Amino acid sequence: MKSISLGTWCYTIGPYAKSPVDFDTVCTKLKALGFDGVELGAFAPHPDPDSVPTKDGRRSLVDKMKKWGLRFSGLVPNLWSQKLVNTADSKPYLNEFRKNCEFARDLCILGIRVDTVQPPTIVDEVGYDTALARVTKAFNECATIAAEYGLYVTWEFEPGFVLNKPSDVMRVLDAVKKPNFGVMYDTSHGQMVAVVGARQPGKKETLPGGQPELIRKLSGRINHVHLIDNDNSCHKDASGNDETSAHLPFGKGKVNFDEIVPLLAREKLPHNWWTIDLCFWPDAWEATADCKKFADGLNKKYGELVAAKG
C-alpha cells in the first residue's frame, strides 16, 4: 500500500493567499483524516529555509512532525521569483535551490521539486534551442547539488511553464541523465499536456493514446506522483487568462484514474508516496476529506501493484 500525503501549498497560495491556514492547523487536520504525511510547500507562512534558519529550529520541526505521527513526502521550494530561461546566469536559481536542499536534508526529506519557472511564451524571447539548453544545463547542476545532500530531484512539467509538450519532456530527460533526476507525474498536468495540449507554443502536440501513452513514454523516469482530477481546463490567473492545469477534487473532472493509476502504481519510485494536489482549488480545506477517501479507494485497488521484473 502507498503512503498518502497532501501538498500544503493549496492552503497558502491562490485563493488562500490572503487568509492562509497555518501549518500546525493543517497538520492536525490531516492527521485526524488519516494522512500519513504532508508535502511541504516551503514558502511563507509555512516553514521555509528563511523562517526556520537554524539546525535547532529544524530539529524542533522534525520532532513536531513525529509527535503528530506525520512524515514529509517531499519539498516544494519557492523558486518562482527566479529566472532560468531569459538569462545566461542561473546562479541565483541554483543558490536558492541549494538553500532548499540543505533545508530538505535537515528535515529528513528525500526529494525536492523543480520547474522551469517561466511561462511558455518566453520561447518567443530567447528561441527554443536556447531555452532547452539553459533549462537542461541548470537541471543537470540541480541534480549534482541535490546528490551532495542525498536527495532526488523531480521536475514538474506543466502547461504554465516553458517546455510543456510531450516531446519537450523527453528532450529534457534525454539531456539530464542523472540517476537522481526524474519527472513528477501529476495527473492533472498529464491530462492537459497529453490530451489537451494547453498553452503549447506553435503547433499543438497531443498523444493519440492520451495519458496512458505519456506514462509509458516516461516509464522508468517517473520518480514522484501527484494525484488529482482535471476537466480539460486551465486555472485562470488574476486577469482571467489560462495559467496552468486546473486541479479539481476527484470526481469533478475527466481523468480516468482506473486507466492510469495502475500504470503509475507499477513505476519504481524511490519512495512509497502518492500525493494529493489541490493547488488553486478555492475550497481545498472543505474538499480534503473527500479527496482522502477517494485516494484511499485507489490505494486499496492499486496500491500494492509493483513494477514488472525484467
Image: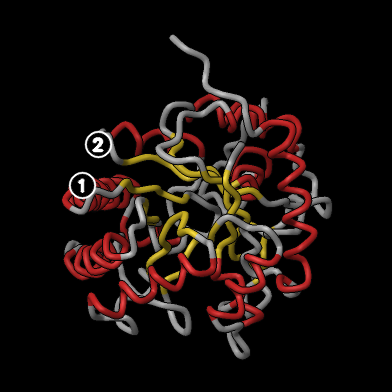
Along the line of sight, the residue nearer the viewer: 156 or 107: 107
At numbered mark 2, what does the secondary structure look like: helix, strand or loop? loop
Say which mark, if any, is on residue 178: 2
Mark 2 is on which residue type?
A: Lys
- Along the horizontal axis of the image, is 119 left or right of 236? left
Given the current orientation, which residue lies at the most extreme bottom position? 18
x 23%, y 75%: residue: 55
Residue 245 in view in this figure: yes
The reply to whether discs 2 and 1 touch (Cβ–Cβ < 8 Å) is yes
**Which residue is labeled 1 in the image?**
147
- Tell me the quadrant of the picture where the N terminus can be found: top right
Q: Nearer the viewer, residue 237 or 49?
A: 49
Give the Cα separation between the discs numbered 2 and 1. 9 Å
Q: Closer to the observer: label 2 or label 1?
A: 1
In this rendering, is residue 297 above or below 301?
A: below
For image coordinates 57% across by 31% down, the residue present is: 214
Residue visible at 71% across and 47% down in the picture: 295
Question: Can you name the residue that lies furthest to the right here?
Answer: 251
Q: Please give left or right for residue 248 compared with residue 46 in the image.
A: right
Residue under the image location 60 percent in, 26 percent down: 213
Task: Please tell me whether residue 262 is drawn above or below residue 254 in the rendered image.
Answer: above
Mark 1 crowd level (few <14, some 14–19, many ≥20, 10 Å Cα) = some
Q: Label 1 amino acid?
A: Ala
Question: Which of the two labelled residues, at mark 2 and mark 1, occupies the earlier sequence position?
Answer: 1
Residue 224: percent from left, percent from top: 48, 44
In the figure, residue 181 lies in which quadrant? top left
Quarter in which the C terminus is drawn = top left
The furthest residue to the front: 67
Where residue 43 sits, quadrant-wise, is: bottom left
Residue 280: x and y in percent read: 64, 70
x and y, in percent, of residue 15 in the image: 66, 80
